[in-house]
């Protein structure tokens, strides 16, 4: 079993070799191999693009494992999902475990696949034909990506194995857990070397979509503020540096998400997608709209979304809508109401409505859905070309405010919070608390896959999600009594059964069953 898995792992290092339907088919002699590939600048450019490709899978995974894990969103219960989507629902209900699979397995494997690709190109770099300047540029970008992948692993699984070199034999494939401290030390070391090597700053907009000095500084600040022994002063310096770069808030909050404004002046790092049939799209919006029998009226083109892609996920909660302050422009830019009729779970869409103060008319039904990435009409069923924000300037201002408040510098934090509030159409605060910064971040970064890890970082996850669970159980009697048992052990996910069986050196996280 282990040898089979090793073959797959090594095969994943070569993402550019043409694939066939059969592993037994011999490649033609003209095909690229690892022995001839990692030589020229063009080869390493392709290798970097292969590593970036693994970033793109994080959008939908994050919708389920971050946004739906939080108090921002839930799901529309649908009888037809009792089979295929139980592994999705349990994540939002805190009923997932080491056997859940699907989203959890996929995210873990994709992150390590990205790390494998980065490790291979880094280990092959010195023997390549690249000039010293070219090697430095590649190394800086690759180290950012490895730090980015490991940060996602650390925040979702904690003490993961640290793999820092190309896998060349079986023993190297099955490493034990590293400590959480060691993982964060490596994240900070990688991103710090990336900065020292001169990863370039953004100088004009729109940007290319590749990692920059601003993204590296934000990633390092997040690591300083998330590691077990927090280093707020260092994070503060990184975030202040970002405020002195070329970024700025968009004048209109809705413009951040416009298809015509990708990689704009507020963007620090976003996941790149293209519309069309070239396989570079995402399907996030189609997952977030309501399950709908006539979604061509909603989307401009029909796609079955009761199954397959399926809609009704990451649905904004009523409490989330009610939590916005009166006059907050971010609400109508973030959430929409689909109104129509519902007959035996078959929802038929009729019109869009605003969420604030919405009252459903008699004999009508409604569904809330995320509006940020909704840009109809679409040309392809179940495909969109919207980029997805990871780091942006509005979030940096609030992260800096959080960092300052954690150091008792509340007065210094106030201007950064008020910049964000002014854009939202809200009055300036005269003082600010840690809770106010957290609330502001919730609304500013809603449905951008930050809320769950924000709650963990700020120490609110157990209390907030326990209260959320009580509300949801009161609203939905079908939720099991065992749901929403939120403990410190539940702040990281389980290593899945398959991983534990393959890697006997891997130790399960506390609170989950080992194998």
Image (cartoon, rainbow, N blue to C red):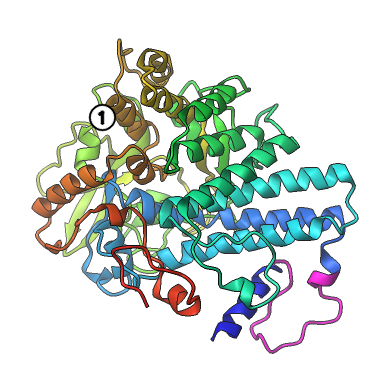
* SS state under label 1: loop
Task: State the residue in front, 103 or 136.
Answer: 136
Check the image and report above or below for 489 versus 208. below
The answer to which quarter of the image holds residue 405 is top left
Q: Residue 498, percent across and down?
A: 44, 76
Name which residue lies at 68% across and 41% down: 193
Residue with the mark numbered 1: 324
The answer to which quarter of the image holds residue 26 is bottom right
The N terminus is located in which quarter? bottom right
Give the main secondary structure, helix, strand or loop, of the magenta stretch. Answer: loop
Task: Residue 364: tell me if it is visible.
Answer: yes
Q: How crowded is mark 1: few (under 14 residues within 10 Å), some or many (20 or more)?
A: some
Name which residue lies at 24% across and 57% down: 76
Q: Residue furthest bottom?
A: 24
**Range drawn in magenta:** 15-35
Q: Residue 86, percent across and down?
A: 28, 69
Task: State the residue in front, 487 or 298.
Answer: 487
Name which residue lies at 23% across and 64% down: 78
Q: Residue 268, percent across and down?
A: 57, 34
Task: State the residue in front, 392 or 485.
Answer: 485
- Residue 221 relative to residue 189: left or right: left
The answer to which quarter of the image holds residue 15 is bottom right
- Residue 175 within the magenta-colored segment of the rendering: no
Check the image and report above or below for 25 versus 506. below
Name which residue lies at 86% across and 69% down: 36
- Residue 34 within the magenta-colored segment of the rendering: yes
Check the image and report above or below for 329 versus 56. above
- Residue 232 relative to residue 206: left or right: left
Task: Residue 300: tell me if it is visible.
Answer: no
């Amino acid at each position: 079993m282990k040898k089979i898995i090793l073959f797959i792992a090594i095969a994943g290092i070569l993402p550019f070799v043409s694939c066939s339907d059969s592993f037994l088919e011999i490649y033609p002699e003209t095909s690229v191999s690892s022995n001839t590939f990692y030589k020229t600048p063009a080869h390493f450019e392709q290798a970097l693009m292969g590593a970036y490709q693994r970033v793109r899978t994080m959008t939908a995974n994050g919708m389920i494992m971050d946004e739906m894990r939080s108090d921002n969103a839930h799901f529309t219960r649908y009888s037809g999902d009792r089979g295929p989507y139980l592994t999705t629902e349990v994540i939002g209900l805190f009923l997932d475990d080491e056997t859940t699979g699907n989203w959890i397995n996929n995210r873990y494997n994709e992150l390590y696949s990205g790390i494998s690709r980065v490790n291979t190109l880094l280990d092959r770099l010195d023997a390549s034909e690249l000039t010293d300047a070219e090697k430095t540029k590649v190394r800086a970008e690759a180290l950012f990506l490895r730090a980015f992948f490991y940060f996602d692993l650390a925040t979702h699984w904690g003490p993961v194995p640290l793999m820092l070199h190309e896998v060349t034999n079986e023993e190297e494939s099955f490493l034990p857990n590293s400590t959480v401290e060691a993982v964060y030390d490596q994240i900070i070391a990688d991103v710090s070397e990336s900065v020292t090597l001169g990863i370039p700053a953004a100088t004009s907009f729109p940007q290319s979509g590749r990692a920059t000095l601003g993204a590296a500084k934000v990633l390092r600040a997040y690591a300083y503020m998330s590691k077990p022994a927090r280093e707020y002063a260092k994070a503060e310096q990184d975030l202040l540096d970002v405020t002195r770069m070329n970024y700025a808030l968009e004048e209109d909050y809705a413009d951040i998400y416009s298809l015509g404004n990708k990689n704009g002046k507020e963007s620090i790092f976003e996941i790149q997608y293209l519309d069309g049939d070239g396989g570079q799209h995402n399907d996030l919006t189609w997952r977030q709209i309501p399950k709908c029998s006539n979604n061509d009226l909603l989307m401009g083109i029909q796609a079955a979304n009761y199954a397959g892609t399926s809609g009704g996920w990451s649905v904004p909660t009523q409490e989330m809508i009610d939590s916005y302050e009166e006059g907050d422009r971010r609400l109508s830019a973030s959430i929409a109401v689909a109104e129509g009729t519902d007959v035996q779970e078959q929802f038929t869409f009729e019109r869009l409505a605003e969420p604030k103060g919405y009252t459903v008319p008699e004999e009508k039904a409604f569904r809330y859905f995320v509006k940020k990435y909704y840009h109809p009409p679409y040309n392809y069923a179940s495909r969109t070309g919207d980029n997805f924000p990871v780091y942006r300037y509005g979030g940096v201002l609030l992260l800096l405010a959080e960092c300052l408040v954690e150091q008792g510098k509340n007065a210094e934090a106030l201007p950064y919070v008020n910049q964000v509030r002014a854009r939202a159409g809200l009055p300036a605060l005269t003082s600010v608390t840690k809770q106010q910064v957290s609330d502001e971040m919730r609304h500013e970064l809603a449905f951008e896959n930050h809320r769950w890890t924000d709650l963990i970082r700020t120490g609110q996850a157990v209390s907030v999600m326990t209260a959320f669970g009580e509300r949801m159980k009161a609203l939905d009697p079908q939720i099991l009594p065992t749901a929403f048992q939120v403990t410190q052990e539940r702040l990281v996910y389980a290593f899945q059964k398959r991983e534990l069986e393959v890697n006997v050196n891997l130790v399960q996280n506390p609170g989950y069953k080992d194998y």
